[in-house]
């Protein structure tokens, strides 16, 4: 079967006879099952059993709770007929697979094949984390998608802000590509293509095709034959070249500049852009037919602000692997890194770590003194009576006073607002929000359970 771990399960059905039959079939196939009890933490793959009479809201609430654990993968199995609206609702809540047991052929094989594939996928994700560092749930999900894309044979479009690691991801897609005897990954930065010569960069040229063409030259398509062509910042490609690239992708043929001979090239195309190509299509700056051709599978890389829990992990990686610094890092340095914004994403964090590492001397720990003055926070207004936001805060408190609230009620309202703002700012990450507020994570957990914040 290829899957050895125990699979947890939770039931939301009262059809105990049918459920016992299903569990018996799964265990007979070699799948070891363990019931998930109250206060248990799910790890790895699991199965949720339900039926058409199950309260969908309760099932979704449980799945939302499970979604906090990055390694959880859920199969939702209905012991009866399931409406398509319920299926979509379960998928939106995080189920990786949904089906009705008695309405499909070979249901045991469906479960076994998913579990076996996920086991292989998780092994590859662990390997990827050595180079594409991060432990946050959104990053783990991105790595899983990356593995899925790599094992397929489709064209891939990587989208994301500058500094999110698009080229690194493209290189990993090529590395994981299972094609036997695949050749190199050829990188073309479309922002560096020179007008008039860009056709030569992609398609090559013949001797004498233009001034200074003193010899015949292969272009990127020829060099990527039987390998991977990575077009970085594809949104910068001029429209005339977009048409030529589309023809090459559709027909697998191209002409060198200055040649009338059609040549063949077979390669996998991986593209990347920080532009919204769908919007570029609407504005007429990018060909719609090319957009559909290159986006067989689209991967959106998350910005660093959506994976802040990875900041410390990334910083440790850069200190250790890039600068060979094994000394401990003072907690206040990590506080500084966590509370800072990174519009340049991981690249900006890496450059900051480079500056700190280059300033650090000796064998002692890395401290706040190693942070260059140019990177210090803006202390304007700190420690004064006219701190940022003071007038707005006074207006809010005045309004509460006029409404008849006393000191305790005002304090309670401001406290709850602070909790809500911190949780929202940290994208629902209670650990980071608690760190920002200087309180325990349990306080925010109680706040979330109260229903005042829905993340």
Image (cartoon, helix red, strand yellow):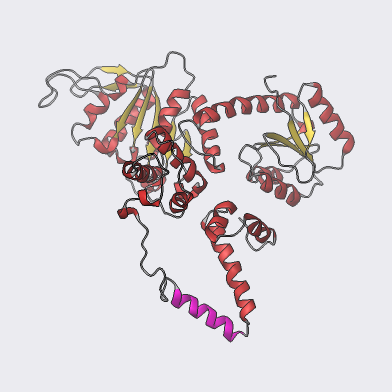
Residue 197 in sight here: yes
Task: Give the camera-side residue of 371 and 184.
Answer: 371
- At which x and y percent is residue 121? 58, 28
Q: Main secondary structure of the magenta part?
A: helix
Image quarter where the N terminus lies is top right
Residue at left offset 65%, top offset 24%: 116
- Magenta stretch contains residue 398: yes
- Direction front: furthest residue: 363
Vertical placement of residue 384 versus 74, above or below: below
Task: Give the camera-side residue of 271 and 335.
Answer: 335
- At which x and y percent is residue 37? 79, 42
Task: Give the camera-side residue of 16 and 357.
Answer: 357
Residue at left offset 38%, top offset 70%: 381
Q: Which residues are magenta?
A: 390-403
Image quarter where the C terminus lies is bottom right
Residue at left offset 78%, top offset 39%: 36
**Location of residue 366 by image quarter:** top left
């Amino acid at each position: 079967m290829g899957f050895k771990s125990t699979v947890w399960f939770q039931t939301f059905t009262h059809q105990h006879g049918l459920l016992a039959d299903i569990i018996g079939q799964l265990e007979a196939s070699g799948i070891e099952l363990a019931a998930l009890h109250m206060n248990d933490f799910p790890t790895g793959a699991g199965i949720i059993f339900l039926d058409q009479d199950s309260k969908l809201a309760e099932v979704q609430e449980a799945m939302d709770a499970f979604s906090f654990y990055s390694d959880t993968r859920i199969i939702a199995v209905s012991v009866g007929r399931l409406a398509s609206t319920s299926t979509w609702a379960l998928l939106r809540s995080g189920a990786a697979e949904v089906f009705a047991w008695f309405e499909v052929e070979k249901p045991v094989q469906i479960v076994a094949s998913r579990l076996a594939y996920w086991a292989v996928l998780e092994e590859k994700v662990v390997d990827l984390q050595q180079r594409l560092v991060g432990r946050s749930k959104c990053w783990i999900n991105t790595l899983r998608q990356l593995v899925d894309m790599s094992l397929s044979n489709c064209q891939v479009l990587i989208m994301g802000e500058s500094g999110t690691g698009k080229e690194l991801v493209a290189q990993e897609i090529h590395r994981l590509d299972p094609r036997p005897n695949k050749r190199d990954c050829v990188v073309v930065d479309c922002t560096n293509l020179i007008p008039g010569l860009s056709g030569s960069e992609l398609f090559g040229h013949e001797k004498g095709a233009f001034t200074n063409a003193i010899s015949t030259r292969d272009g990127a398509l020829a060099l990527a034959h039987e390998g991977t062509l990575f077009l970085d910042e594809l949104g910068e490609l001029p429209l005339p070249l977009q048409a030529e690239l589309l023809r090459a992708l559709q027909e697998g043929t191209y002409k060198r500049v200055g040649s009338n001979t059609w040549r063949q090239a077979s390669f996998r195309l991986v593209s990347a852009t920080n532009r919204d190509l769908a919007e570029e299509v609407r504005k007429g700056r990018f060909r719609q037919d090319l957009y559909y051709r290159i986006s067989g599978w689209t991967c959106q890389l998350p910005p660093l602000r959506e994976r802040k829990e990875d900041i410390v992990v990334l910083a440790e990686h850069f200190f250790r692997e890039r600068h060979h610094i094994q000394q401990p890092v003072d907690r206040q340095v990590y506080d500084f890194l966590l509370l800072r914004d990174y519009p340049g994403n991981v690249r900006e964090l890496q450059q900051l770590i480079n500056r700190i590492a280059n300033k650090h001397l000796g064998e002692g720990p890395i401290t706040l003194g190693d942070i260059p003055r140019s990177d210090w926070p803006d202390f304007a207004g700190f420690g004064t009576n006219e701190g940022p936001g003071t007038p707005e805060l006074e207006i809010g408190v005045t309004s509460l006073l006029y409404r008849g609230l006393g000191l305790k009620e005002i304090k309670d309202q401001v406290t709850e607002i602070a909790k809500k703002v911190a949780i929202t700012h940290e994208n629902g990450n209670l650990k980071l929000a608690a760190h920002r507020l200087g309180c325990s994570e349990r306080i925010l957990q109680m706040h979330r359970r109260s229903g005042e914040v829905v993340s």
